[in-house]
Image: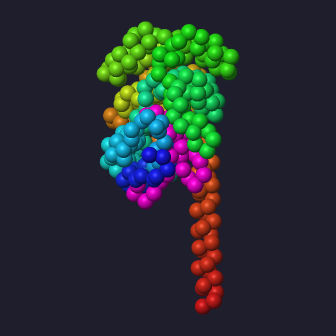
Amino acid sequence: MTTKWHKLLCKKDQLQLLGTLNGGQSFRWKQIPENQWLGIFSKKVWILKEATDAILYQVHAPNSTKTSPKKCNEELSNYLHLDVDLSEYYPKWSEKDPNFKDAAEQFYGIRILRQDVVENIFSFICSQNNHISRITSMVEKLAEYYGEKICDINGITYYSFPDVEKLAADGVEQHLRNNGFGYRAKYISNSAKLIADGGGNKWINELQEMKYEDAKKNLMTLMGIGAKVADCICLMSLGHLQAIPVDTHIYQIAARLYMPKLGKQKTVTEKIYNEIGEFFRDLYGPLAGWAHTVLFCADLKKFQDNKVETAKTSKHKKQDSKTKINSKKLKT
């Protein structure tokens, strides 16, 4: 399949592409003209756009890869976690938390992506003390240097994310240092070698079978992975939907809206980190990580700016409406 549009049924309130694909979960999606999104997973290039009660999509894959609408529907549905019915959870979370209820008005249909474990591990190693555009650049470089070519679209070549064995090869660290990765080059090389020495896919498969606490501890044995990044991977790749990655945004949200005592803390200690996680797990239940992601999106400045613009537009529409009503009254 290349240019034909296919349809995956999905009610509008079940999926919002903007918050889901641009909220810091994955670094391989970009918005393109006509409100479409282009991204890469499952060694294919996908183009998505929202429609009434459906997601329309195109798939670009290597000529050697056999695809079918049924298989692609299954892959996309799995990636977007569409088996979780948000109409069941959003009302519960809104009832428990008025702050969530407010956030949910704009950030409906936020989904946790089911991402490839290897890609997620090394993408978030790149995220250490970094900003989105640079993380995205690093992830794309890893794919270009060590991944496999998928296809060309409009003169741009797209690559799959590399297998861990490619990142564990000799010379990778120096090559990455020469190309702007800095100290993260050592983290990537060292972690890849540890996984490869542990059996590669065997290490990954065992990680996927672990309980949340064990998986988190195991991830933290990798160089460059602390509690927050380990929780990101647990949440976004390993199916541990109770995981709460506590970064600056979530700490500030907790201190401002839920746990005012945190305002006196100068640093996020392990004890404080765990207290914040337990607070949100007690509040939201077994899918607390999902609910927390909605709060995280609502706190991002880029979405705050969009919210302001939306509010302004709404206000102008109301004013225009009032003007038309008053005009009609004057005429009569």
- Position of 317 with respect to 213 (left or right) is right
Q: Quadrant of residue 96?
A: top left
User: Is 59 one of the magenta-colored residues?
Assistant: no
Residue 221 % position (x, y): 45, 12
Q: Residue at x 40, y 10 (%)?
A: 198
Q: Is residue 210 visible?
A: yes
Residue 290 % position (x, y): 41, 38
Residue 67 % position (x, y): 39, 41
Q: Nearer the viewer, residue 269 or 156?
A: 156
User: Is 52 one of the magenta-colored residues?
Assistant: yes
Quadrant of the image containing the C terminus: bottom right
Q: Nearer the viewer, residue 307 or 266?
A: 307
Q: Residue at x 58, y 42 (%)?
A: 153
296 over 147 or under it: above or below: below
- Position of 128 with respect to 93 (left or right) is right
Q: Residue at x 44, y 13 (%)?
A: 195
Q: What secondary structure characterizes most of the magenta part?
A: strand
Colouring method of the image: rainbow
Q: Nearer the viewer, residue 188 or 12?
A: 188
Q: Residue at x 38, y 51 (%)?
A: 8
Residue 2 % position (x, y): 48, 46
**Which region shows up in magenta?**
25-54
268 over 136 or under it: above or below: above
329 over 52 or under it: above or below: below
Q: Residue furthest bottom?
A: 332
- Position of 129 with respect to 67 (left or right) is right
Q: How many marks?
A: 0
Q: Is residue 276 visible?
A: no
